[in-house]
Image (spheres, rainbow, N blue to C red):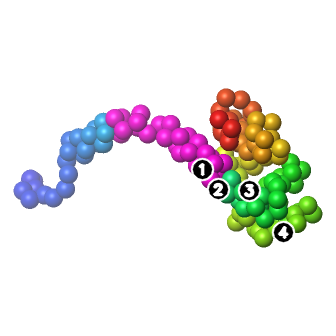
């Protein structure tokens, strides 16, 4: 018995579609690898150079100086004992880098006079992949 008007796809048609999709994926995937890490680094730079830096500058304007290393970035969220004219919070939440670790803060800085603000990067160890505010 032969079906004259059968509807559906043959096995060969399905295999061709799978092969075409596989070829497209093989061409696109190499271009996309590494992009997620680039996006994390860009987000980290934006936090360090703009978001957290703005909060620190507002804190300095209100209190006459940056939070100490001991007070850290927590001084931007809750009033510290050394804050004379605290008008915060200066950040909405505690800042974490894109890898889920707290940003490192030091004031006065070793690399800059005012403060050092940095992330340890992907590996979490000080080294060449750190994202900093001094370079």
The relative height of residue 130 versus residue 46 in the rendered view (above or below) is above
Q: In the displayed image of the protein, which residue is found farthest to the bottom?
A: 87
Residue occupying image coordinates x 72% and y 61%: 58
Label 1, residues with CA under 10 Å away: few <14, some 14-19, many ≥20: few
Q: Nearer the viewer, mark 1 or mark 4?
A: 4
> At 76% from the left edge and 42% from the top edge, which residue is drawn?
116
Q: What residue is shown with label 3?
A: 56
Q: Is residue 132 left or right of residue 59?
A: left
Q: Residue at x 76, y 68 (%)?
A: 89
Front residue of this view, candidates 100 and 120: 120
Q: Position of residue 67 (x, y in %)?
A: 83, 54
Foreground mark, 2 or 3, reads: 3
In front: label 1 or label 3: 3
Would you say residue 33 is visible in this rendering? yes
Real-space CA distance between mark 2 and mark 4, rounded to the nearest whole angstrom: 21 Å
Q: Nearer the viewer, mark 4 or mark 3?
A: 4
Q: Earlier in the sequence, mark 1 or mark 2?
A: 1
Q: What is the number of the mark on residue 97?
A: none
Is residue 73 covered in magenta? no
Where does label 2 land, which residue?
Answer: 51
Tell me the distance, in whole angstroms, between the alpha carbons under discs 1 and 3.
14 Å
Nearest to N terminus: mark 2 or mark 3: 2
Task: Of the two numbered discs 1 and 3 on the same chain, state the one appearing first in sequence.
Answer: 1
Q: Which residue is labeled 1 in the image? A: 46
- Between circles 2 and 4, the one closer to the viewer is 4
Say if residue 77 shows up in the picture: no
């Amino acid at each position: 018995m032969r079906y004259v008007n059968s509807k559906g796809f043959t096995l060969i048609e399905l295999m061709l579609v799978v092969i075409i999709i596989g070829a497209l994926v093989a061409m696109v995937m190499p271009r996309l690898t590494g992009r997620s890490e680039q996006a994390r680094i860009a987000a980290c730079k934006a936090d360090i150079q703009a978001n957290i830096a703005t909060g620190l500058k507002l804190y300095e304007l209100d209190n006459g100086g940056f939070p100490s290393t001991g007070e850290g970035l927590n001084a931007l969220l809750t009033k510290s004992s050394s804050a004379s004219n605290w008008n915060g919070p200066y950040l909405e939440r505690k800042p974490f880098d894109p890898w889920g670790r707290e940003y490192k803060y030091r004031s006065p800085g070793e690399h800059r006079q005012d403060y050092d603000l940095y992330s340890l990067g992907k590996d979490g160890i000080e080294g060449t992949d750190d994202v900093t505010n001094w370079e």
